[in-house]
Image (cartoon, helix red, strand yellow):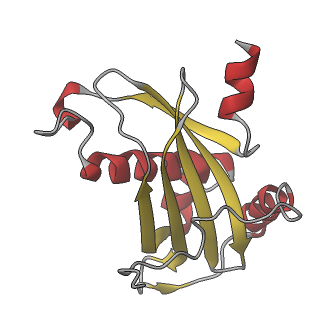
Amino acid sequence: MGSLVFMMHTTNLKEIHRLAVRPEWIDYNGHMNVAFYVMAFDQSLDSLLDLIGFTRTHRAETGNTVYVLETHVTYLREVKEGDPLVISLRVVDCDPKRMHLFLEMHHAEEGFLAATSEQMVLHIDASGPRAHPMADHVLARLEELKALHENDPLPPQVGGKIGIRRK
């Protein structure tokens, strides 16, 4: 089991969410459909918001929310019905209005990296809606999470672009 834990945490990211692949998420190829990878990453964003103090209560009291502006998902290895998953996070960068996030989805038992998601998230005053600075305590928590990996190299998927490589 010790080697399994090492395999799962080679990137040393902060675990934020666990889930299992549900039967209704399986497509005609017998593995999890791409839409549900995105949904799993989106659910983990909710876990991150709770972790940094941007809870439902805080959102209701302040009238603030977040919008995902851009997301890039890489599908590296298929997962199947019942597979346990763990999603981990790295705050790549942040400022008072934005969060640049990188998430990894690993198989919780076998340890392999199944998918990644890079996201740009904007903090919003929902009454506008318009970009709005987040509360100091929320930004401070994001900065703490960012500091965990400031000296680590970026994963290869960060900043990737899509295109057909020509020789």
Residue 12: horizontal and vertical position, in percent?
76, 43
Q: In which quarter of the image is the C terminus?
A: bottom left
Q: Relative to residue 36, is residue 114 drawn left or right? A: right
Residue lying at the far right of the rendered structure: 151
Residue 110: name its quadrant.
top right
Residue 76: horizontal and vertical position, in percent?
44, 49
Residue 137: horizontal and vertical position, in percent?
78, 62
The residue depicted at 41 percent of the width and 42 percent of the height is 77
Residue 138: name its quadrant.
bottom right
Q: Quadrant of the N terminus?
A: top right
Nearer-the-camera pick, 1 or 54: 1
Nearer-the-camera pick, 141 or 33: 33
Nearer-the-camera pick, 1 or 68: 1
The residue depicted at 74 percent of the width and 40 percent of the height is 10
Relative to 133, say whether 21 is above or below: above
The residue depicted at 36 percent of the width and 54 percent of the height is 38
Nearer-the-camera pick, 59 or 154: 154
Residue lying at the far left of the rendered structure: 28
Please say whether residue 56 is visible from this viewpoint: no
Please say whether residue 35 is visible from this viewpoint: yes
